[in-house]
Image: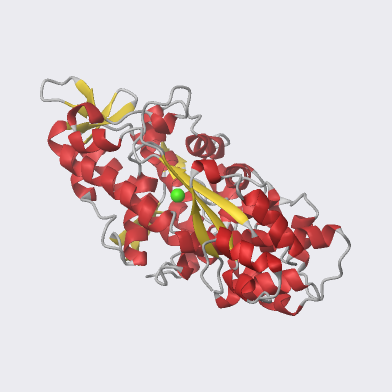
Amino acid sequence: MSQDRSGLLPSSGPERCGCCGMVQFEQLNEEKVFKDPVHRYIHVRDRLIWDLIGTPEFQRLRRIRQLGTTYLTFHGAEHSRFGHSLGVYEIARRVIGIFRNRGDWDDSETMPALCAALLHDVGHGPFSHSFEKVFGTNHEQFTQEIILGDTEIHRLLSRVSADFPKKVADIIGKTYENRLVVSLISSQIDADRMDYLLRDAYFTGVSYGHFDMERIWRVMRPHGDQIVFKFSGMHAVEDYIMSRYQMYWQVYFHPVTRSAEVILTQILHRASRLYRSGFRFKQMPDVLIRLLEGEIPLADYLRLDESVFMYCFQVWQDEDDAILRDLCCRFINRRLFKYVQLSRDQLNADAELTELFRSAGIDPDYYLEVDSSSDCPYDFYRPGEEEERLPIQLQMPDGSLHELSRESDVVRAITGKRRTDHKLYYPKDRVLNLSDSLPEKKKICALLHING
Ligand code: CA
């Protein structure tokens, strides 16, 4: 709410306590608050956090949607990574507060943890999913570069101490030696997931996805280097797992969102191929040229946001290339592809369709696409996988630890079950517009189960 940027005035680095040498972080004269629909208020008391929020690199997150193309399915889903990042910070802050009150927390880890929570997504690009697929970039790598490279964020973090930026980067990269701090930001139940589930449910307007977060905070306990949950809070944890399960299939993998993503990906593929073949675009922003040339320096990456892409899609509707023009027009006006469900053994069945599309004059490289989604809402037993897959442990009344699915029938029922879904996307309008005298039309309609 109160967002005057006086916090950006140069402030001196933190001081050290005369007797113990511990870093004393400067507090703001007055607490700042952001009004937030999920957490009601987000409280900022530390000057460093306030200054980080004010950097251009962090402000850029306002122009990147949290859920990419989901707004074309759920019109409320316009929320940004900026709000989500503040939310993750706020959850981390409150959980740390609870741990501290119980004497369960090492205070020297507070600022590294809060900075990591705030900055964990700072490297995300516009429409990350499609973007990374086409250009081979990696948002996690950019997050590291932003924290460790030549940026405002890096300058602010370095004022604390020379090794402070590295600490923050290591927490986000999950290589930090204090695993408790890492698991607060990334684990099966972490500040990131808690925020996005509630935030995405709120903004999409769906009725699932809610769970009692405050109850979960109350039953969280540091135990050695991990966070465990008091047995009495098992039902709140079950609720959280179920909400994750529901959100994946009802929101994150929604077939219409995936259709928009397929089109977006094809636009980027087409633009990239055209550029490489020497096509002369009528409109092409400089910042995109570096991207299309393959090596994008950090400074240029930071100039990319969804408004740059939306502008391109808008003006490319007038380009001379028919495919690029059509795909952009589809995305801007939401004329999406339709789909048919494929079973696993039908996955290669599109070979015949590919040929039929080609001979009917619809380029299958851009207009026929299999998209697969899969997730496991609570999948703890996958040997050799990342830290995130560590099981959720319940602390029993006698102090022993029991893995969640051992105690919960509900969780056991969905444990380790990976559901995979394959869909074949295609432009139904193009197929219907084919001339009835074309022999391919009938065959295509039959294969795609189109009547008429
Ligand atoms: Ca996140």
- Look at the image and tell me whether residue 284 can be seen: yes
- Residue at 35% x, 37% y is 188
Q: Residue furthest bottom?
A: 318
- Would you place residue 358 above or below residue 163 in this image? below
- Would you place residue 320 above or below residue 142 in this image? below
State how many labels appear. 0
- Would you place residue 186 above or below residue 399 in this image? below
Residue nearer the viewer, 232 or 253: 253
Q: Residue furthest right?
A: 278
Q: Give the quadrant of residue 141.
A: top right
Residue nearer the viewer, 378 or 256: 256
- Would you place residue 381 above or below residue 365 in this image? above
* Quadrant for the N terminus in the image: bottom left
Residue nearer the viewer, 8 or 244: 244
- Residue at 56% x, 74% y is 335
- Residue at 36% x, 66% y is 203
Question: Residue 164: x percent and y percent?
Answer: 52, 37
Q: Give the quadrant of residue 22.
A: top left
On screen, residue 283 versus residue 434, left or right, reads: right
Question: Residue 369: x percent and y percent?
Answer: 61, 55
Q: How is the image coloured?
A: secondary structure
- Residue at 44% x, 39% y is 112
Question: Residue 410: x percent and y percent?
Answer: 21, 38
- Look at the image and tell me whether residue 196 can be seen: no
On screen, residue 353 versus residue 417, left or right, reads: right
* Quadrant for the C terminus in the image: bottom right
Question: Residue 63: x percent and y percent?
Answer: 54, 66
On screen, residue 270 versus residue 110, left or right, reads: right
Residue nearer the viewer, 440 or 111: 440
